[in-house]
Image (cartoon, rainbow, N blue to C red):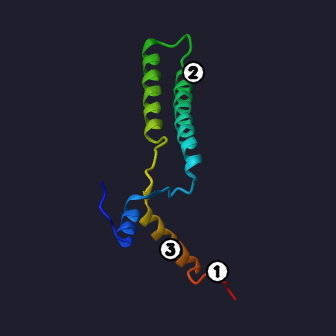
Amino acid sequence: MSTAKSPQEKKALSLAKDRRNLYGESPHSSRKNIKRGKQNQHQEERRTANQALALINAGSSEEQMIAHEVAAETRARLHRLDGFKKEADRPLGDFIERQQERRERSGMLDGQPKRDG
């Protein structure tokens, strides 16, 4: 059971615990895009493995076949390492800081965009 908190304590807790997606997606689309990213990564791994294995022909020696198989496995592992990675959402306080910095750079803190001239 929580104890009664002042509005300032509530605000501090909110800034620390609430999370925001800094990537710029809505939470609904990011749920779909996580699945899509994993799907694309797995498809890319299969494609690179199949490309390496397609180099093997019927007249290849056993040593060549083993070399191509090892090459396919290494390429697939490299693609897996460089592939899709989920990013955790950031605390609301960080999100607000980044927003303020962006507004300062663009000159929008006073409510009006900065104009040259």
Q: Amino acid at mark 1?
A: Pro
Q: Position of residue 89 (x, y in %)?
A: 45, 54
User: Residue, x 47% and y 17% (percent of image)?
Assistant: 65
Q: Front-most of 116 and 58?
A: 116
- The mark found on residue 54 in the picture is 2
Residue receiving disc 3: 100
Q: CA distance from mark 1 to mark 3?
A: 14 Å
Dot 3 alpha-carbon crowd within 10 angstroms: few under 14, some 14 to 19, many 20 or more: some
User: Residue, x 43% and y 18% (percent of image)?
Assistant: 66
Dot 1 alpha-carbon crowd within 10 angstroms: few under 14, some 14 to 19, many 20 or more: few
Q: Position of residue 81 (x, y in %)?
A: 43, 39
Residue receiving disc 1: 113
What is the secondary structure assignment of the residue under circle 2?
helix
Mark found first going from the N terminus, 2 or 1 = 2
Image depth: mark 2 or mark 1 in front: 1
Image depth: mark 2 or mark 3 in front: 3
What is the secondary structure assignment of the residue under circle 1?
loop
Image quarter where the N terminus lies is bottom left
Q: CA distance from mark 2 to mark 1?
A: 57 Å
- The mark found on residue 41 in the picture is none
